[in-house]
Image (cartoon, rainbow, N blue to C red):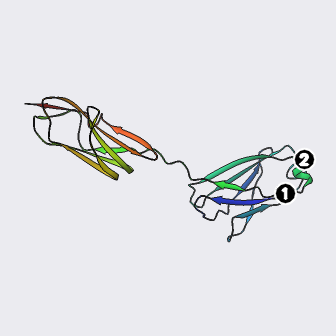
Amino acid sequence: MFSGWVSTSGGEPCNNPAITNLNTGVTWQAETSPTSNYYQLVLRYDIDITAGEVLQFEVTSPYGCQLNITNYTITADDIANGGLFNFNISLESPEKPAPNITSSASSSPVTDYSGAARTFNITIDQPVNVSWLINGIVVKDSEKGVTEASYTNTSAVVGTWNVSAVVENANGTDMDMERNGSACFGQ
C-alpha cells in the first residue's frame, strides 16, 4: 500500500493523485476522500510492482495551476514493510512571471518643439512601481502598485533625450525605452 497526504499552498482539496509504474507504463488513480487530502493505493508485489521499479506520483491542483511530479524507486524495505506510508506531496504556487510593459502610447523617436509638453504612457500586465528617467536620471518615482502610468515632460530643450520607464515588483523588472525612445526637441 502507498499512502500519504497532498497539501496545496492555498489549502485547496486535491484528490487526484495518479501513480505510474515507469518500468511497465501502468497508471493507477489513488483512492481519495472528498473531505481530506489523504490518498492511498493498494498494489500487489510481483504483480504490480517489484523492488527497483520507479513509481511516478503526479498530482495537480483542482484548477491546474499547481503541479508536482515526483519519482520514487521502490526498495526491498518498502516491500518488506508492506508499502510506503506517509509519502506526502506538497504543491507549490508556480513562480510568477516578471512584469511586462504591454503597450505605450508614444512612438519612437518623438519630435517636438522646445518647451512643448509631451506625455508618455505605458500599460503593464501586473501591479508595479514605476520610475521615469530622462537620460538615466529619475524624474518621476511616485507611481506605486499601478498597471497604467504616465509621465508628462514640460521642460524639454533642444537636444536628444532618452525617456525611459522602468517597472518593478517582487516578480522582476521591465524597461521601456525603445518604444518611448528618444525625444528630439527642436526650436
Q: Amino acid at mark 2?
A: Ala
For disc 1, the marked residue is 43
In this view, 185 is above or below 152: above
Seen at 85% across and 43% down, the residue is: 52
Q: Earlier in the sequence, mark 1 or mark 2?
A: 1
Q: Report how many numbered discs are placed on residues in the image.
A: 2
Q: Label 2's element?
A: helix
Quarter location, residue 81? bottom right
Q: Residue furthest top?
A: 159
| Contact flag, marks 1 and 2 (Cβ < 8 Å) | no
Residue at position x 69%, y 59% in the image: 6
x, y percent for residue 104: 28, 43
Report the disc number at residue 122: none
* 125 left or right, relative to 72: left
Question: Extreme right residue here?
Answer: 80
Q: Amino acid at mark 1?
A: Leu
**Residue 108 coordinates in the image, percent (x, y):** 24, 34
Q: Nearer the viewer, mark 1 or mark 2?
A: 2
Q: Which mark is residue 76?
A: 2
The N terminus: image quadrant:
bottom right
